[in-house]
Image (cartoon, rainbow, N blue to C red):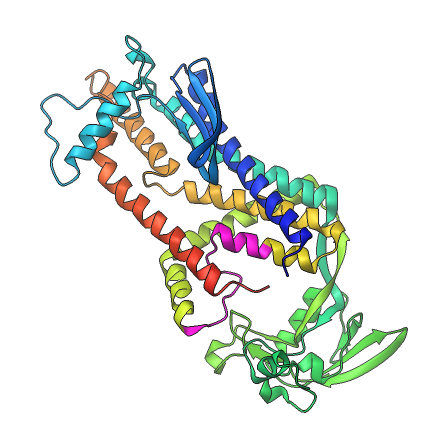
Amino acid sequence: MFNIMSIITVLLVALGLGLSIALHELGHMLPAKAFKVPVPEYMIGFGPKIWSKTIGETEYGVKWVWLGGGTQISGMYPPKPEGYVDKGPFKEIIAESREESLAEIPAGQEYRAFYNIAWYKKICVMAGGIFTNLLLAFIFFAIAFCGLGAMTPNNSIGNVTKCMAGTVCEQTMNTGADISTLTLKDGVSPAELASLQSGDVFQSINNTKVTTFAEVQGAINDSKGKQISATVLRDGKEVTVTVSPVGVDENGAIASNASNISRYVLGFTPGTERQYMSLAQSAEMTVQQVGLTLQIIPQLPVKLYESVASLFTGERRGSGSLLSIIGVGQIAVESANQADTSNLAYILLTLIGSLNVALFSFNLIPLLPLDGGHVVNALYEGAKGLIYRIRGKGKPAPSDVARTLPIAIICGGLLILMMVVTVLVDIVNPVKL
């Protein structure tokens, strides 16, 4: 349901994203200015300008579409090497890019051009934006985990899932019909069949004491689908039920066969309690998040294919699916609608922290037009300069980055295509929490 809280949530996510982009670009601009490189433009967003003002030699402004931004740095492409002839289908684009880059440099100040600064200064400029996002992730997570406290699952039941996703039970429930005559085979959750209730606190499973959600989850998973005996505390009294866990795939749907089973579940969401972390624990959580995100990057082609396939199959998308900014907004709204007001700030802070982790990780990809591509080129220049000094050949000419424009154009096109596809998938088949 889209209500006032949903509108506030979307606006806050947009504000958080805009702030993250603004500071990312600031991470490029400040080192560039520190090294005296001309910066003609600093813009947040794409499309038509909302507002701009020129201060010194830089025009600062905001544009309508907050899905990116740009810091224009003069002299990104050096002059064409003497005697070199541009070839191929992109030769005109390469030539025009060189001309535009050189035209940005104030007359008589070629020494200030980006291509003329030392390789390690280039790394500072291009990596500045990347590591700004990492710093922001640490800050947002620290405020959430240390200041507000992490909502951590415990050994109680928060909500019982009546029907497993994508089953006859769910279809029946959506019509408003009574599901009390349906069975586990029809998709009624084991927790619902066992009459487990919200607020029940697990005491033991198969006579083994459980005090944490991890222990409850482990005992359920270890059953491999066999019937278990669970004792819960309900209204001050112990109640024992027998229940058979069901195997689900990685998307949370009932597995079609044994080979697709990812885990075994009863069909409930755990209760939570607020726990505060130390700064060290928060930093560790941030590093773990970065590691998980970096693991996903090589899987992007497969994840994109799965997203497109879901358009035709209607298959439920899991939490590991690729998301566009539309999908992020949908999850933010759904989370806000399910949470009370006291948890909304926590949800938004961790979501924006995760966005910054994604921006950091994605920009590490060593391909142009991403920042990582420019960092790799600077490292190449540094290695080349070292070899020249060892061989007594003096200082080499700046790397002719313009020649890599075909790669940048292709990669940029693929990134735009991925963005368009993920937006379409998020609209047609959104991820459900």
Instruction: Locate the C terminus and report the quarter of the image it occupies.
Output: bottom right
Q: Is residue 309 above or below residue 168?
A: above
Task: Residue at 18% x, 29% y: name it.
Answer: 95
Q: Is residue 384 above or below residue 269?
A: above
Q: Position of residue 425 (x, y in %)?
A: 44, 61
Q: Position of residue 378 (x, y in %)?
A: 33, 29
Task: Residue at 76% x, 50% y: name it.
Answer: 342
Q: Is residue 237 above or below residue 389?
A: below
Classify residue 388 as left or right of residue 281: left
Classify residue 135 as left or right of residue 79: right
Residue nearer the viewer, 342 or 231 = 342
Q: Position of residue 268 (x, y in %)?
A: 68, 72
Extent of the magenta region: 313-331
Instruction: Locate the N terminus and report the quarter of the image it occupies.
Output: bottom right
Query: In the picture, residue 33 is in which quadrant?
Result: top left
Q: Is residue 120 above or below residue 182?
A: above
Residue 324: within the magenta? yes
Classify residue 291 as left or right of residue 217: left
How many numbered discs? 0
Residue 322: within the magenta? yes
Residue nearer the viewer, 250 or 413 = 413
Q: Position of residue 336 (x, y in %)?
A: 67, 55
Residue 261 shows in this picture: yes
Task: Residue at 38% x, 36% y: name it.
Answer: 371
- Extreme-top residue of the structure: 108
